[in-house]
Amino acid sequence: MSSDFEAYEQDFGTVTAEITNKIGKIPKLSGEEKTQLVLNVDKQLEEVRELMEQMDLEVREIPIQSRAMYNSRLKSYKQEMEKLEKDFKRSRIAYSDEVRNELLGDDASSSEGQRAHLLDNTEKLERSSRRLEAGYQIAVETEQVGQEILSNLHSDREKIQRARERLRETDANLGKSSRILTGMLRRIIQNRILVFILGAIILLTIILAIYFNLRGH
């Protein structure tokens, strides 16, 4: 997964470098050449947005313990993307002003303050939208972490239950072994007592035989 992310990073760096270079050229051009360059930059910005979405998806697939580093890198790329969009808007507005001035003359300059105010409001709305999107992403990641924790807890619970079952089986086996050993010990004691009794009877028989034999003589 990280190799895919790094590949997207390389593409991001290449495309954003091209966009930065082209944005710097827009105010210096005029006519059809400037129009084509504006359209080209707009297309490349869309490509960068798609790369950002791909990187965001890749980050969500990275293990939690490594995800923080990639989230930090992704955040810096988003900030860079925001700066590019802002610079492009400024160059595009300047381009629109130039075209309008060419068409309308001095009357177009009176609305410059209104356009600046509109641009400021648009940027505020976009910042709010990005904050909402960031909040949503955090909520999604939090949900994923919660699901993984619940999964781990469920797995740990199953392991504990299996350990308890093995412990019960071990206790049962130990109890059975203890009963077997107790029975064997009891039989050993009984056998020794029996041997002792038989030995005593044999000894008594020998003594009586000797006694009666001596008495007969």
Image (cartoon, rainbow, N blue to C red):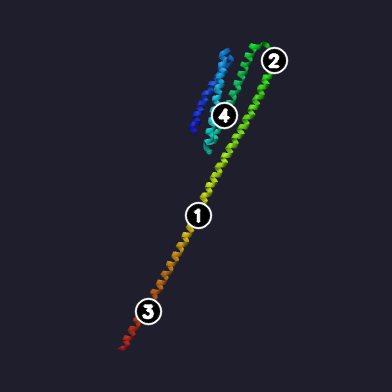
Real-space Cα separation, disc 1 to disc 2, in angstroms:
84 Å
Instruction: Tell me where residue 206 appears, x and y as whole percent.
Output: 34, 81
- Which is more toward the observer, 181 or 106? 106
Name the kind of residue labelled 3 in the image. Answer: Ile
Name the kind of residue labelled 4 in the image. Answer: Ser
Dot 3 corresponds to which residue? 201
Tell me, yes or no, whether the two marked residues, 1 and 2, touch with CB atoms within 8 Å: no
Of the image marks 1 and 3, the number of the one nearer the N terminus: 1
Which quadrant holds the C terminus?
bottom left
Of the image marks 1 and 2, the number of the one nearer the N terminus: 2
Dot 1 corresponds to which residue? 165
Pointer 4 local density, CA inside 10 Å: few below 14, some 14–19, many at least 20: few
Name the kind of residue labelled 2 in the image. Answer: Ser
Dot 4 corresponds to which residue? 76
Of the image marks 4 and 3, the number of the one nearer the N terminus: 4
Instruction: Tell me where residue 102 appears, x and y as whole percent.
Output: 63, 11
